[in-house]
Image (cartoon, rainbow, N blue to C red):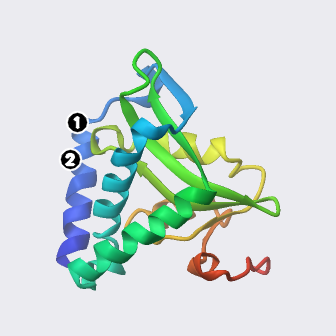
Amino acid sequence: MNSEGVNVMNEVKNAEKNAVSAKNLPMLLREANQNDLNFIYNSWSYTYRKSPIMYRMDVKLYFENQTKQMHRILKDSCVYIACDSEDPSHIFGYIVFEDLQNIAVIHYIYVKNSFRKNGIASYLLESVGINERPCVATHDTWYFPFLRDKYSGRLIYNPFLLMGGHYYDGY
């Protein structure tokens, strides 16, 4: 495992130590609004930069192109926010997705470090129907294998959907 992988695994271990149980959280699921966009752009671009594929890319090239890609994706996608039901501006995490022919296309899922390993990512995935229909992830991250394994083949990786590719039903 390279140094980026070690850093991510250390983040997970630290998050586990400091985590709050999702069962004890007064959680609300809501659609994203204009006030959430800066948080979404920043968290997505900086955490995806650490992904197995993107950390090798030139920093300037990455941020210029990732911002354009996020803008295109967000224009056509739904974003659900998991937040504090007593303070909806306190975000725990979010999921960016599209519906495509009864398939949930998951562009990105993010949970703040202090709330990871507490079922929030699962809550977000279940909110888009991972237990009822296939889901396709368009972005590979260090956490993707954990989610893929947890959902036993109901979540696959297909970045070609970002380039106008087609979903393949033969897995």
Q: Can residue 149 be seen from the camera position used here?
A: no
Instruction: Write the residue at 22% across / 78% down.
Output: 59
Residue 1 vertical placement versus 115 (above, below) = below
Instruction: Write the residue at 35% across / 66% down.
Output: 48
* Quarter of the image where the N terminus is located: bottom left
Residue situated furthest right in the rendering: 101
Q: Find residue 133 and report its horizontal and vertical position in percent.
A: 77, 56
The residue at which mark 2 appears reads as: 14
Q: Can residue 161 be seen from the camera position used here?
A: yes
Is residue 151 rendered to the left or right of residue 115?
right
Q: Nearer the viewer, residue 122 or 164?
A: 164
Q: In the image, which disc is placed on residue 104?
A: none
The number of numbered badges drawn on the structure is 2
Mark 1 burial class by Cα count in 10 Å: few <14, some 14-19, many 20+: few
Is residue 82 rendered to the left or right of residue 125?
left
Instruction: Write the residue at 79% across / 81% down.
Output: 170
Asked which quadrant contains residue 49, the reply is bottom left
Considering the numbered disc 2 on the image, is that residue within a helix, a strand or a loop?
helix
The residue at which mark 1 appears reads as: 18
* Quarter of the image where the C terminus is located: bottom right
